[in-house]
Image: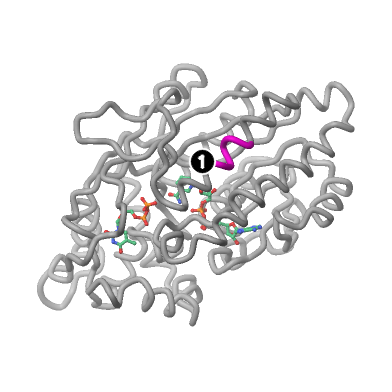
Amino acid sequence: MILVTGGAGFIGGNFVLDWLQRSEEAVLNVDKLTYAGNLRTLKSLEGNPLHWFARVDINDRPALDVLFARHAPRAVVHFAAESHVDRSIHGPAPFVQTNVVGTFTLLEAVRAYWSCLGADARTAFRFLHVSTDEVFGSLSPDDPQFCEMTPYAPNSPYSATKAASDHLVRAYHHTYGLPTVTIHCSNNYGPYHFPEKLIPLTIIRALAGEPLPVYGDGQNVRDWLYVRDHCSAIRKVLSHGAPGQTYNVGGWNEKTNIEVVQAVCDLLDVLNPKASGSYRDLIAFVADRPGHDRRYAIDARKIEDELGWKPAETFDSGLKKTVQWYLNNQDWVNEVQSGEYRKWVEVNYTQRA
Ligand code: NAD
Ligand code: TYD
């Protein structure tokens, strides 16, 4: 079996669903279930003997040791993290705890387990670390996209803690020989995305007739990747990636934030027309995020040239699927809009108006 951390979150949840649609190999899903973890995402797996769920914090070394001893995974895919930049600005401590200390604790548990495997199993083992393009910092409009050799320059508490975890993973390969692979991925979007992030936030607020907050001048650029394309890249790197290597994964979809929000509005105008006017009428420019990175863009040629991976979705096709998914899955949306979520909206948006 494989062990997945953070498999009740957005990307991890999509990965587990995708994996079990394509594979007979079991998944041990290790997740603390923070505000971002949601077992409802995995509802279709209820009763599936190939899905094992353990509510465990990656900071809990004894619990991790028990899971490794009991289930003997052949690989770890590490998604678990605090993942929202705005939350890291309001309160960085949980980011240090989970992204740095938690990854360290997990690596130590993996090292102890892996060191005791037989020679063939040690060679075949993989620790796949899911990182982000944000560790490379911010690009100017004319800069080349991030490649695997781009120097680290993290700017937010979130990206700084992800960078720290990347360095630990790198060190465990170089020092102990742990067979690690790391993916630097651009902004994901798709089903089951927690509505604190731009695209689901825009869809849900538009449907509720609420203002659509765009930070600053709306000209910040992100490189959007449909989440199922990220899942296929992870499967590819897990099966064919070379130990010690890093791979940049992106969708070749650079868009300004205002373009993204307008595209969501235009899709909603077609799929769920308002009684009068356009959803674009709801767009509201608000105070910028402190230290807001201007542009992220991924050069994904290495994974294409070496492993033959390319995204299947264009931004248009992926966004249409995403908007349609939110329209069809109001129950999931209602469930995540808990008291905690409403509190976050108050903390992050009241002072920006
Ligand atoms: P998410 O916030 O939706 O989910 C994170 C999951 O990790 C949740 O299920 C949460 O309960 C779990 N978790 C948090 N702390 C934990 C802990 N201490 N122990 C065990 N589980 C814990 O995040 P996501 O968007 O799915 O991102 C997954 C990974 O991909 C993260 O490592 C993130 O840095 C990386 N990434 C995300 C994006 C993106 O656009 N979302 C882009 C690039 C990289
Ligand atoms: P987000 O989804 O938080 O991802 P990240 O900060 O990791 O890239 O934000 C994507 C972009 O959208 C980012 O430039 C910030 C911007 N943004 C807004 O303009 N308004 C919002 O309400 C949010 C949440 C984000």
Q: Nearer the viewer, residue 82 or 341?
A: 82
The correct choice, above or below, for 184 with respect to 36 in the image is: above
* Image x and y of residue 33, in percent: 63, 65
Residue 178, quarter of the rendered image: top right
Q: Nearer the viewer, residue 32 or 169?
A: 169
Q: Which residues fall within the magenta stretch?
A: 163-168
* Residue at horizontal 35 percent and vertical 71 percent from the top: 348
Q: Is residue 82 left or right of residue 159?
A: right
In the picture, residue 268 is in which quadrant?
Answer: bottom left
Q: Residue furthest bottom?
A: 339
Depth check: 292 or 242 in front? Answer: 292
**Residue 55 percent coordinates (x, y):** 72, 63
Amino acid carrying mark 1 in the image? Ala
Looking at the rendered image, the quarter that the N terminus falls into is: top right
* Among the 4 quarters of the image, the one containing residue 305: top left
* Magenta-drawn stretch contains 145: no
67 versus 76 height, above or below:
below
Q: Residue at x 48, y 36 (%)?
A: 184
Q: Which residue is mark 1?
A: 163
From the image, give the main secondary structure of the stretch colored magenta.
Answer: helix
> Residue 84: image x %, image y %?
45, 58
Q: Residue at x 46, y 53 (%)?
A: 157
Measured from the top left, where is residue 216 in percent x and y?
A: 20, 58
- The residue at the point 49 percent across, 71 percent down is 332
Vertical relation: 273 (above or below) 218: below
